[in-house]
Structures are given as C-alpha cells and as structure tokens.
Image: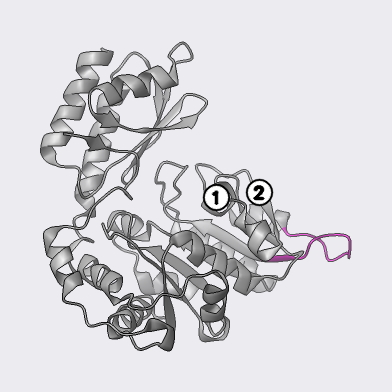
Amino acid sequence: MIIDLRSDTVTKPSKAMLAVMMEAQVGDDVFREDETVNQLETRIAKMFGKPSALFFPSGTMANQTAIKLHTNPGDQVICDKFAHIYNYESGGVAFNSGVSCKLLDGHRGMFTAEQVKEAINPEAYYYSPTRLVEIENTANRGGGSCWDFNEILKIREVCDTNNLGFHLDGARIWNALAVHKEETLEQYGNVFDTISVCLSKGLGCPVGSLLVGDADIMKNAIRIRKVFGGNMRQAGYLAAAGLYALDNHVERLVEDHKRAKELGEALSKLSIIKAVEPIETNIVIFELNKDVDENEFIKKLKTNNIHIIGMGTNKLRIVTHLDYTDAMHEYVIKTFKTIFS
C-alpha cells in the first residue's frame, strides 16, 4: 500500500467518475460543439454569477490566460511572495505576458489592502504600470490558509480606485468555502474580475480547470487559450468528470480537513518537529528541528510507503485528499509515533 500525500493532485478517478466520463456526449470543442464542455462552463459561470467560463487543461494555463487578458508587456502584477503564479508557474508571467511581479510580504500568503495601496507604482514613465492584483485562496504555501473576505472587499476598493484588475487563483476555493460556509461562490464572482478554479485538486478529477470572468475581459480568452496550445477537441470526457465532482466531491472536503488537523496534532507531539503551521484546510506544513535532516526524514517515511514533499529549509508539506482513506490515516499516525518518537 503506497500512501501518497505529496499533493491532492495525485488522486485517480473513481469507478463512478470513470463511468460518467465514458458516457459523455462529446463534440469538437474547437468548434464549440462539445455539449458536455458547454454544460460544465455554463454551470460554473452560473455558480459564480458570471456571464462566461472557459475550460482549460490546467490551472497554470487558466492563470496565465487571466494575466495576459489583464495586462500588456511591461506592466506589473501585485501578488504575495508565496503566490503560485510567481513560484510555481515556470516564470510564465514574464515569458507569456512580459510582465513583472511586485511581491508583497504577506502573512501565510495573504496581505492587506493597505499593502496593495503602498505597492502601486507612481505614474512616472520610468515605473512599470501597475495593472493587476492577484490573490490565492486557499494560499498553498501559507498552509492552505483562507483569506478574510472583508479584507478581499477592501482590496477590491483599492483596485476600483486605481483602475486595477483583480484576479483570484481559486485552485482550492472549494476548500476555502468548506471552512467559511457563510461565503458563497457568487460573492466571489461579484468581487473579482477573473477567477480560476481547479477540478483536479480537492475535487479528484484527472484533468481540468476553468477561468470565469466578466464578458468584456473574457471575450478574448479563447484566443489566448489557443495561443497557449490549450484548445482541445472531444474534451467532454474530461468535462464530465468535473460535473460528477461538483455533484459528489465538494461536501466531502471536510473529511480531508479533519484528517489534516489530526495529522498536525500527531506531528506537533514529536520532539523532532519545531513547528506546525496553523491548519485550516487540507494542507499541513511543518518544520523540522535544525539538527534533523529533511531528506532523511522523507526517506524514512518513503521506506514505510508514505510519500510527502519537501519545501526546502527543513519545511515539509502533507496534503490530504479523496484517495486518502481512514485505514491509511491510522497507519500514518501510527508510523509517526513508531519511527520518530
């Protein structure tokens, strides 16, 4: 039994999901004739109260398309120093859009409206024009941290005052809403100009993200997707997985969050652990004591069929997900106690 806790992207489609995928009604999506893709896009757009949504093969491509739609070469994007678009998208902001990032020193991947205000460049010609503010909810490197929606509203005000676009990398927005049940997708749709959402992380799909947005900015999204090589033909087989996940895999996210908290509690009791970041969703980030070798720690777990990921500087990450069962959970906690106590 291999227990893979490196990411929530490691899940495989369930038999029920595969059955739905094989029964999908498909067509040529480049001609916009795949009815299952159209159904998924319409459903996601409606969930956010937006007029338009577009299906993408990856969250990175959806984010990169949003940045391209909001900016011109030489412009600047404000984001957190931990942002996925800056750290984990292969320099795409520069390569694809020719823009730079103004990095904010936030707290666990989250910053304030005041920080945004201070980061906006003056209008003098020798500065890069600030054009876009980007946030990530949940914040991956912040340990799956969830934004305060009131702070998001304040940032929106700053964007409106300064004529800035506002993009949400909502790869794990489903996890955030599972914690903050008083918030709705439509509220997020009202605040952001563009939002990317992922189906292949917490929702367990094999492939797929969507970009939703207002009609004026989204009218060029399909052309950008084509430029990036993201147009697909009979993509309805993949879209069907997304429809199934929306019906069956959203409410169960609380199970992942519960197990993540229990893993954090187990880790915090080990003498070799320096600190465990606050756990809100399905991501556990913890730090080893300085005298503990990160690679040896990972190797010991791997020897016991448990796979996790290192983040550098003695920090490591565990992510719970759909394929992580109760039996696996009990084994992992028992293994922590056995080999590290």
- Residue shown at the point (15%, 35%) measured from the top left: 328
Q: Which of the pair 118/198 is nearer the observer?
A: 198
Query: Magenta part mainly helix, strand or loop?
Result: loop
Q: Secondary structure at mark 1?
A: loop
Q: Position of residue 315 (x, y in %)?
A: 45, 28
Q: Which of the pair 161/315 is nearer the observer?
A: 315
Q: Quadrant of the C terminus?
A: top left
**Picture quadrant of residue 319:** top left
Q: Is residue 16 above or below residue 49?
A: above
Q: Which of the pair 299/145 is nearer the observer?
A: 299
> Residues at badges 2 and 1 in contact (C-beta under 8 Å)?
yes
**Picture quadrant of residue 217:** bottom right
**Picture quadrant of residue 318:** top left
Q: Is residue 4 above or below residue 181?
A: above
The crowding category of the residue bearing disc 2, from other C-alpha atoms within 10 Å (few below 14, some 14 to 19, many at least 20), is some
Q: CA distance from mark 2 to mark 1?
A: 9 Å
Q: Position of residue 137 (x, y in %)?
A: 44, 56
Q: Determine which residue is flagged by label 2.
A: 103
Decide if residue 319 is in sight here.
yes
- Residue shown at the point (20%, 15%) measured from the top left: 338
Specify the label residue 209 is tagged with.
none
Mark before the other along the chain sequence, 2 or 1: 1
Q: Quadrant of the N terminus?
A: top left
- Residue shown at the point (54%, 66%) measured from the top left: 167
Left or right of 262? Residue 94 is right
Specify the label residue 83 is tagged with.
1
Q: Which residues are magenta?
A: 120-131
Q: Is residue 144 above or below residue 178?
A: above
In the image, what residue type sits under mark 1? Ala
